[in-house]
Amino acid sequence: MSETPQTPEAGPAASSPYDSDAIAPLDPRSLRGLAHPLRMRLLAMLREDGPATASGLAARIGESSGATSYHLRQLAAYGFVVDDPDRGTARERWWKAVHRGSRFDSLEEFLEHPDPEVRGALTTFLHTVATDHAEQVGTWLGTLHEWPEEWRQAWDLSDYTIRLTPELALELDKQVHQLIESYRDRVPEGTEDSARVRIHFHAFPRRTG
């Protein structure tokens, strides 16, 4: 799972607002530290929009700065965010994301974990991601009329059902991810008529009958 949950607006992000463009692998400890809806939202905002302060983030999502400050410190304790030394002052602490995204190397470690808190953290994490995806699509549909005609013709909301084996499903998943990654960094920041485009890819088997 590369790019985690996200919505929001801050100032324009730098060309690379992270300490690393790596995708951070999640382990049981880091998952438990991340699996909180507000924490995940704050991290997503920093990843997508660049560095911000606790008070700035709080104002954008309608939370208290005390709450955002606490959860940012928790994210820092688990290695997801760090202070931004180029922006911080004695009065304001700026935070930035360390990685571009997060991933699971294998869900089995979490699905079969003996600690119920780890299994619960996985459920919270996945459902938060799914809820966030649905909210983002809803926001897009609600603001569709505000976009230029070119963008109103360039979006997609499709679904397919095809019969696959697990091996072919995995092959399809990898190829889609590779195709998406091949478009990364092709459009420089600030290019006229460009926009950041969110891409949600869901693929899962369904029982019939």
Image: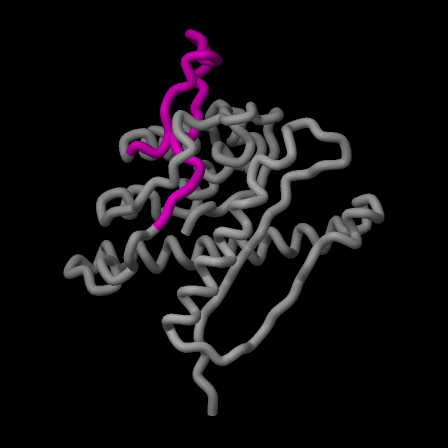
Residue under the point 46% across and 61% down: 173
Specify whether 10 is left or right of 77: right
16 to 122, vertically: above or below: above
Q: Nearer the viewer, residue 61 or 128?
A: 128
Describe residue 4's horizontal placement relative to residue 27 as left or right.
right
Can residue 66 be seen?
no
- Residue 127 on image: x %, y %: 43, 59
Determine whether, in the image, residue 174 is placed left or right of residue 24. Answer: right
Extreme residue in the right direction: 149
Residue 115, by quadrant, is bottom left
Relative to 11, is 167 above or below? below
Is the residue 197 above or below the residue 124 in the image?
above
Q: Residue at x 50, y 26 (%)?
A: 16
Residue 56 within the segment the image draws in magenta: no
Apparent side of residue 58 relative to residue 101 in the rendered image (left or right): right
Exactly how many numbered labels are in the figure?
A: 0
Residue 11 % position (x, y)? 61, 25
Q: Residue at x 56, y 40 (%)?
A: 184
Residue closer to the observer: 108 or 191: 191
Q: Nearer the viewer, residue 112 or 21?
A: 21
The coloring applied to the image is one colour
The part of the image, by quadrant, that contains residue 147 is top right
Q: Position of residue 80 (x, y in %)?
A: 35, 34
Q: Is residue 91 magenta?
A: yes
- Residue at x 77%, y 36% (from the top left corner): 193
Residue at the extreme top of the image, as rendered: 90
The answer to which image quadrant residue 98 occupies is top left
Q: Position of residue 51 (x, y in %)?
A: 50, 24
Which residues, given as a range, are shown in magenta?
79-103
Which secondary structure type mostly characterizes the magenta part of the structure? loop
